[in-house]
Amino acid sequence: MNGHVLRMSGVGVRRGDSRLLHGIDWVVEEDDRWVVIGPNGAGKTTLLRVAGTQLGPSEGTVELLGEPEGEGDVFELRPLIGFAGSSVAAQVPDRQLVLDLVISAAYGLLGRWGEEYGVPDHSRARALLSRWGVAHLAERAFGTLSEGERKRVLIARSLMSDPELLLLDEPAAGLDLAGREDLLNRLRRLANDIDAPALVVVTHHVEEIPPGFTHAMLMRAGAVVDAGPLEDVMTPANLSAAFGLNLKVEYDGERWSARAV
Ligand SMILES: Nc1ncnc2c1ncn2[C@@H]1O[C@H](COP(=O)(O)OP(=O)(O)OP(=O)(O)O)[C@@H](O)[C@H]1O
């Protein structure tokens, strides 16, 4: 691999007459920690689905982990890309046990179907649940968890296959203040871990940018407003353009905030 885990050139996605994405040029390097920010309908989830090989582009090229898309075996590539988001949560049967949900991600599955797992798999799954503060939930059914507990279990699951690229779609959505702060703290630790994969986190809120993140992409109407190092991109002019209203933006050296003026 030549340093970058993901390269998109001129990527567009069309559905009928709608352009969900257009003209996306994006390179994610292996040490990058990206946040993708934009208003509802900007195309963030669509972008993540293209990055995660769940959706092919209508135009342009995507190169993942050094393989041009379409040339590598997508089933070999997928375990190298971790993904957590509400679309995954929606597919998990309520009765699925948490430990089984995490451990089965080693094979790209969404639950256990009778396959055997060894001691290293069990140890890794329990260690990940512990790192995300949900070890005590290992024997619980997924359907009985709170929103915050589900988010953390799904992130633990997304790391099970030791991915090269981790994609998190709105990890803080639906969390209360304590839950959001706890999650941001854990994401900060992940961002600062030199063994962690390249990270891409999607959010609507600049307050949810975890400390330690290095790059930002701002999106509006399926296109990139600006992308690059966080401090260069997070200007009032850029954020105002992305959200379509006049914004004041503040940074306290660790966390960002924005409000209308
Ligand atoms: N299959 C489809 N056909 C037509 N339009 C679609 C289709 N899928 C998504 N869209 C539209 O594409 C746009 C981008 O959707 P996407 O979910 O990527 O946005 P988003 O930035 O993640 O939004 P949100 O923040 O609300 O989750 C939306 O306007 C959505 O309605």
Image (tube, grey):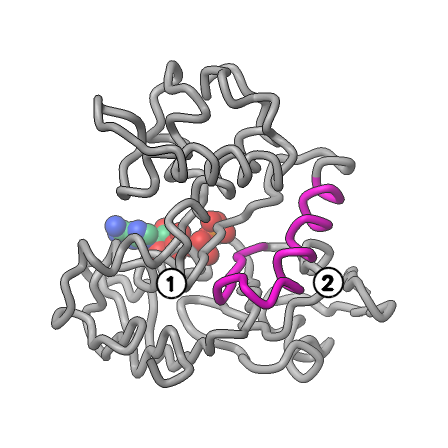
Count of all numbered marks drawn on residues in the image: 2
Residue underneath mark 1: 47
Q: Residue at x 69, y 79 (%)?
A: 237
| Residue 41 in sight from this viewpoint | no
Taking the image as shown, residue 205 lies to the left or right of residue 15, namely right
Pointer 2 or 1: first along the chain: 1
Residue 87 x/y as whole percent: 38, 39
Residue 44 x/y as whole percent: 44, 59
Residue 183 x/y as whole percent: 67, 44
Residue underneath mark 2: 211
Q: Is residue 189 magenta?
A: yes
Q: Is residue 243 above or below residue 87?
A: below
Near-viewer residue (124 or 164): 124
| Residue 73 in sight from this viewpoint | yes
Q: Residue furthest front?
A: 119
Q: Is residue 60 above or below residue 70?
A: below
Near-viewer residue (23 or 4): 4
Q: Is residue 203 above or below residue 47?
A: above
Which three-letter amino acid code belongs to the residue tagged 2? Pro
Residue 242 x/y as whole percent: 58, 70
Q: Is residue 228 above or below residue 95?
A: below
